[in-house]
Image: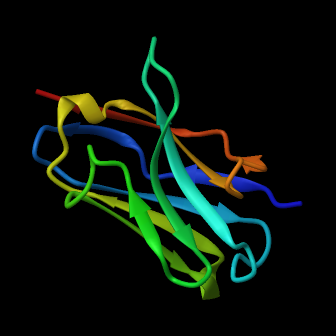
Amino acid sequence: QVQLVESGGGLVQAGGSLRLSCAASRSISSIEVMAWYRQAPGKRREMVAISTSGGSTNYADSVKGRFTISRDNAKNTMYLQMTSLKPEDTARYYCATGIMGDYWGQGTQVTVSS
């Protein structure tokens, strides 16, 4: 079992940047898959980025080249660096473990103004 706490969301203008953090209650080095998801009002939840314990990453087409997922195993924390933000990136962002989303955080709101 693991508890996840997201932070770093906020209000930013289009073109700006934010870094989201996902702090875990235990070591994440052995967690094979961790991911960031987002859900905008009235829309389905979508995967944004995935990180594996082996160092592989994958991104949704909509964020490729703008977002970077990373882990700091020493701090038991996963990050999502978001640059060149667009209004369509506005959503609540969640971190989760496992390919099927075994454990979830409570989310952090990201709002991008035009």
Q: Residue furthest bottom?
A: 74
Q: Is residue 34 left or right of residue 100?
A: left
- Name the residue at 36% across, 49% down: 60
Residue 72, position in %: x, y?
Answer: 54, 81
Q: Which color scheme did the rendering employ for the protein? A: rainbow
Q: Quadrant of residue 81?
A: bottom left
- Name the residue at 62% across, 88% down: 74
Q: Residue furthest right?
A: 1
Residue 99, position in %: x, y?
Answer: 67, 55
- Name the residue at 65% across, 52% down: 96
Q: Is residue 103 left or right of residue 90?
A: right
Q: Quadrant of the N terminus?
A: bottom right
**Does 102 appear above or below 112?**
below
**Does 76 appear above or below 59?**
below
Residue 65, position in %: x, y?
Answer: 20, 61
**Does 22 appear above or below 89?**
below
Closer-to-camera residue (75/71): 71
Closer-to-camera residue (89/53): 53
Q: Residue furthest top?
A: 42
Q: Tally the marks.
A: 0
Residue 46, position in %: x, y?
Answer: 48, 36
- Name the residue at 10% across, 27% down: 114
**Does 62 appear above or below 70?**
above
